[in-house]
Amino acid sequence: MRSSPLLPSHQKSGARLTSAEAGGEVITYGAAPAEYAAAAEEGSLLLDRTTRGLITVTGGDAPDFLHRILANDVKGLAPGQGNRNLLLTGKGKVVHVFDLAALGEGFLISTEPGEAPALMQALDMYLFTEDVELTDETELHAPIEVVGPGAADHLAAVVGELETEGVAAHSFQLCPFGEAVTRITHLAVAGKPGWRLETEPGQATALWSALVEAGATPGGLVALDSLRAETLCAAVGREVTEEIYPQEARLDDAFSLTKGCYIGQEVVAKIDTYGGLNKQLFRLRVSHDEPVAPGTRLTRELDGEVRDLGVVTSWAYSFAADGGVVLAYVKRKHQEPGTEFRLGDSDATATLEG
């Protein structure tokens, strides 16, 4: 995975970063409560997403090809529209989660960091004689995200006139900034309405600085994870793995029940019609504020027997709840709000929230 072009700026500003091996992501700029408040209460939170991947899909057969294999609608998207989308296995489990945008003459796929090569390879497996070309353009773009009540005002101060009222999710606008055109997409950021600004790597630092000058608050993983936990927003690599059905991870906006056949569609439709999920993602309040490791088991004593009933996928400090929370998969029949579980072998507990 490539380094962020904003890394020198983060280092100069004294941001606390993860290790280089972990991607050098911003943990916090030093005032996590204020970063969280900017997104949840007032102002806007600025997040570095410049290491995301980008794939272009072009060719005369691109709409039919993507519509045939992807879980969400493709052919129904007009230029300037988009959606969150999935590539599933034949058994209906999630392989890739990404954002799709229709250009009119092709499509853009924005992937999680480091995922573009694997998604390219997966898509190519379904290509035979179709007129479709897949191109990895990760090195040519550098996304930045902004979320919070003041986000639209801060954006307008930087890019000028911007349509913000009644804008459909995943629709995008093109606005000039510096020597490049910036694609601005309205989408959910950590489960809250936000915006993604996609510019060239050489313009990323100037765009970041302009947004900070306009009033946006730079932040990182602490605030992001708090927001994500509070909104029950699944993260790829944590909650979303190849062992998960989309309904288990609450990815309901990323697949269609009406578009017809696609890879894994029969399983997705069967789950929707008949139920049958053995587990689903929930938020639980922890009895202490110490971090809880992913993989920690949730247990309860039932009829004199200790039963394994779930697994923790993420921990965060919730500023809204003023305490620790976890996201976890909880087994069916044990999903009633208020249900209390024991965390691993400790005496700590986690209580399922509504």
Image (cartoon, helix red, strand yellow):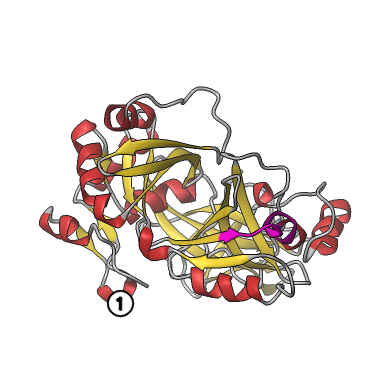
Dot 1 surroundings within 10 Å: few (below 14), some, or many (20 or more)? few
Magenta stretch, residue numbers:
57-66
Q: Nearer the viewer, residue 70 or 129?
A: 129
Q: Quadrant of residue 159?
A: top left
| Residue at 23 percent of width and 32 percent of height | 215
Q: Is residue 249 visible?
A: no
Q: Quadrant of residue 131?
A: bottom right
Q: Nearer the viewer, residue 28 or 138?
A: 138
Mark 1: secondary structure: helix
Which quadrant of the figure contains the N terminus?
bottom left
| Residue at 77 percent of width and 60 percent of height | 68
Q: Nearer the viewer, residue 316 or 237?
A: 237
Judged left or right of residue 65, residue 118 is left
In the rendered image, residue 90, in percent from the top left (x then y), is placed at 78, 72
In the rendered image, residue 31, in percent from the top left (x then y), is placed at 21, 46
| Residue at 27 percent of width and 51 percent of height | 204
| Residue at 50 percent of width and 22 percent of height | 165
Judged left or right of residue 122, residue 231 is left
Which residue is under mark 1? 21
Please, what is the three-letter code of the amino acid marked with disc 1? Glu
Instruction: Indicate yes or no whether the magenta region holds residue 33.
Output: no
In the rendered image, residue 201, in percent from the top left (x then y), is placed at 29, 56
Q: Is residue 189 visible?
A: yes
Judged left or right of residue 20, residue 41 is right
In the rendered image, residue 260, in percent from the top left (x then y), is placed at 84, 53
Q: How many marks?
A: 1
Image position of 326 with respect to 76: above or below: below
Image position of 232 with respect to 90: above or below: above
Image position of 113 with respect to 14: above or below: below
Which quadrant of the figure contains the C terminus?
top right
